[in-house]
Amino acid sequence: NAGVTQTPKFQVLKTGQSMTLQCAQDMNHNSMYWYRQDPGMGLRLIYYSASEGTTDKGEVPNGYNVSRLNKREFSLRLESAAPSQTSVYFCASSERQVTGEQYFGPGTRLTVT
Amino acid sequence: QKEVEQNSGPLSVPEGAIASLNCTYSDRGSQSFFWYRQYSGKSPELIMSIYSNGDQEDGRFTAQLNKASQYVSLLIRDSQPSDSATYLCAVPSGGYNKLIFGAGTRLAVHP
């Protein structure tokens, strides 16, 4: 039981390049989330998916797109990376009924130069 | 005012002491509160949940909720160096399991 997995672990991009961060969970959870974490800012929600087939914007969605591919997988895409998107990205999942209990993946450390 | 506020610290306590971490929130309608622990370079993990006024205890950890004053605290008894981490307070918002996180308090337990 791997829980929540994320790929890649590290990535360096040049400004303007695109990439997709992958996330998968094997806990049969309904809801999935993408956060970014910057020093002194805590975790900020980028996008979430309450259930398969739905996605919604969070607090900081600009510059990102998401796809809920199926119940297990939720990807985050940066179409044209900017230095302001340098951050650590976490994917998380939860059962819809248990509001605060989220399980996090190991994170992706992204640097945009 | 931010929705969830925490003192960034660092909070430094000696081994064996009680560490007290505090969190204030703005939404008077909040019904549940969560404490996550995050070790340096790792992902957050849930350590405590509290749903009603009063105390919720789990081993060395006690979460305390005061809805009238809109604060929630986490007490760690007999602090150990392994407790050194950043502690994040989280409050549900807007339905659909969205959580609002505080910026976290860094705790350092020194031998």
Image (cartoon, coloured by chain):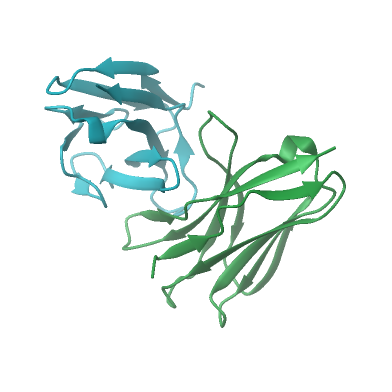
Chain colours: A cyan, B green
> Going by the picture, which residue comes out furthest to the front?
A113
Quadrant assignment for the N terminus of chain B: bottom left
| Picture quadrant of residue A113 | top left
Which sits in the foreground, A22 or B95?
A22
| Picture quadrant of residue B15 | top right
Q: Residue A33 in the image: x percent, y percent?
A: 33, 41
Which sits in the foreground, B75 or A69?
B75
Q: Residue B108 in the image: x percent, y percent?
A: 71, 42
Q: How many marks?
A: 0
Image position of B40 (left or right of A14) = right
Image position of B107 (left or right of B7) = right
Quadrant assignment for the C terminus of chain B: top right
Which sits in the foreground, A57 or A88?
A88
With respect to residue A76, does A95 lie above or below?
Answer: below
Q: Residue at x 39, y 65 (%)?
A: B2
Which sits in the foreground, B65 or A1?
B65
> Going by the picture, which residue comes out furthest to the bottom?
B68
Q: Residue at x 72, y 40 (%)?
A: B83
Q: Residue B55 in the image: x percent, y percent?
A: 71, 68
Q: Residue at x 47, y 52 (%)?
A: B103
Q: Is residue A8 visible?
A: no
Q: Residue at x 78, y 49 (%)?
A: B13
Q: Is residue A98 visible?
A: yes
Q: Residue A84 in the image: x percent, y percent?
A: 24, 36
Image position of A27 (left or right of A77) = right
Image position of B63 (left or right of B68) = right
